[in-house]
Image (cartoon, rainbow, N blue to C red):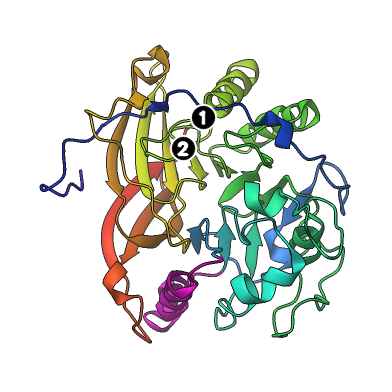
Amino acid sequence: MIMNLSKKPRYNTPVFKKNQPDDKYKFQPLPNPTGQYPFHLNINTVIPAISTQKMVFHMVGDTGSLRNPDFTRLVAHAMAKQYQVDATDQPQFLYHLGDVVYNHGEATEYDRQFFIRYQQYPAPIFAIAGNHDSDVNPAAVIPYQSLAPFVKVFCAPIAGPVDFNLVKGRQSMVQPNVHWTMETPLATIIGLHTNVPKFGIVTQEQRNWFAEELIAANKLRPEKMLIVCLHHSPYSADINHGSSLDMITFLDTSFTETGVRPDIVFSGHVHSYERFFKTYPDGSTTTFIVAGAGGYDELHAVAALDDAQFSNNNSLFNNIELLNYCDDKHGFLKITIERTGYGPELTGEYFSIAHESAQAPEVDAVFVERFKVQAKRL
């Protein structure tokens, strides 16, 4: 485990933060889909050259920042720079885990927080929405509906210019809905929408869709991995959010009802990197990754054992362990999925950027850790 020995002992399990207020009143209705049910996007319609043997992409969350955009710029620069290192290992796209724009997903903030920062990023960017992307500013000069700007940027029916993108260059993405499934030759990637409240909400309509998607994706195993992405982290040991009981319950219920568990679950929301390993009663396992240190200037440290605001005294945490974390630097993931004789294998590499580099014009990302996940076999 990555530990700073000068710190107090930290939890090696998820935690719940005590005495959390209920903010479910912040829920926002979902916008209408821009594509056809069941909201699939074949990646070959956007990137025709995706190989059936190897796929490489970046993944990061929580890149938006109102107060200090320096870290967003450095993370974006470091990811773009990886394209210059090795043409055979070049990431082909970025999958964003939400919170592109703070604090209320306004169109007027997309230039400063997204388009300018990712102007030099040379590949397509896909996304699920975070709680800040989904929120609505009640003081906005021009009224708007929840996720309206996000839909224009990421869910356009046809790729084209975005009217509030003054930078130009990057066109809209063509995702069919705010919850959607990416079809690739090596993996099925299901992207959920978990709304505005601090610990997330998933509508019954989306729950039904998710169950259908799990069952459909399971039929493609072992030729394809099954990956689930959502913004709100089900498991976390951080001092700002902690774990989400709502998301744990939602996922566990969905997995039990369908009899299907994914190979790996990615989330953002928490501004740190955390890697958990969960063992289920039947002996099967799933890796859970938090990767929300993409640029927001405030990072979320892992809770100290003597912090009375947190507890891991819950049976939901009996069989899940925090194996590694990086909570004092911004960073991003590079994901490689390769076909092997045993089916697809995912290799995740986490890279960090030091805080003291914030003013540097260029900075190299520092390798933190590597993990592997083998696709489940039926």
Quarter of the figure that contains the N terminus: top left
Q: Residues within 10 Å of mark 2 (few under 14, many from 20)?
A: many
Secondary structure of the residue carrying numbered label 1: loop
Considering only vertical position in the picture, is 174 above or below 345? below
170 in the magenta segment = no
The magenta-colored residue range is 66-92
Residue type at tag 1: Ser
Q: Which residue is mark 2?
A: 241
Secondary structure of the residue carrying numbered label 2: loop
Majority secondary structure of magenta residues: helix
Q: Residue at x 79, y 61 (%)?
A: 140
Looking at the image, can residue 135 be seen?
Answer: yes
For residue 264, side relative to residue 26 (left or right) = left
Please provide percent x and percent y for residue 308.
30, 25
Q: Are marks 2 and 1 in contact (CB under 8 Å)?
A: yes
Residue type at tag 2: His
Please tell me in which quadrant of the rendered image residue 11 appears.
Answer: top left
Looking at the image, can residue 173 be seen?
Answer: no
Q: Nearer the viewer, mark 2 or mark 1?
A: 2
Please provide percent x and percent y for residue 182.
67, 52
Considering only vertical position in the picture, is 48 above or below 126? below
Please tell me in which quadrant of the rendered image residue 89 appears.
Answer: bottom left
Front in this rendered view, residue 243 or 92 = 243
